[in-house]
Image: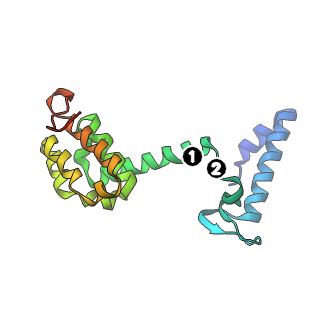
Amino acid sequence: IGLAWHEFIKIRRKSKRGSQVMFDIEVKNMLVRHEGVVCHVYKCTAEPPRNTIGCGRNLDDNGISEEEAMYLLANDIKRVKEELNMNFGAWRTMPEKARMVCIDMAFQMGITGFMGFLRTRKLMEMGMWLEASEEILDSKYAIQTPSRAAYNSRQLALCGQNGKDIRRSSK
């Protein structure tokens, strides 16, 4: 996490502000040296041990901020879209609501879980939105997270018939 020489010179030339920026960089580098960078949750050496991540971030006492949560979410969405591109390229050509369902399901259950929905995905590729929406409801996913599955089912049903819900039992 070092600083390129030309950046160092540019910052040093800027009086007090440059000094503060340099100080902050040096503090950051020192803490990285002392704490290390661990990109998964681990137990620290304190008594009692605390769940920790990154450079000594105590999750038990400090958690994360909403801004940090949104940053992580943006990265997760990017990752899920990349995984969908690699594993289910057809998703890119689907209506927006269907793409959102793909992202939501892959986000929740991982790409492997989403790829297990073979019939649902095949029906989606064929533009058979009502059948795909019903297929979602006939799954362990719908039992484990009924509200989310019902929402995604409705979104797929809305892909047909110019955005009108074409299911018989819609409200």
Image coordinates of residue 44 in percent, x first then y, are 70, 69
Q: Secondary structure at mark 1?
A: helix
Decide: is 107 above or below 95: below
Percent position (x, y) of residue 38? 63, 64
Q: Can residue 71 be seen at all in this image of the molecule? A: yes
Q: Which mark is on residue 64?
A: 2
Residue beneath the point at 77% across and 48% down:
25
Marks 2 and 1 in Cβ contact (< 8 Å)? yes
In the picture, measured across the screen, residue 141 lies left or right of residue 120, that is right
Residue 69: mark in rendering: 1
Along the line of sight, which residue is nearer the eye, 93 or 100?
100
At label 2, the amino acid type is: Ile
Q: Residue furthest right?
A: 16
Q: Quadrant of residue 41?
A: bottom right
The span from disc 2 to disc 1 (Cα, nearest Å) is 7 Å
Identify the residue at horizontal 60%, vertical 45% (top origin).
Answer: 68
Residue, x 83% and y 40% (percent of image)?
A: 20
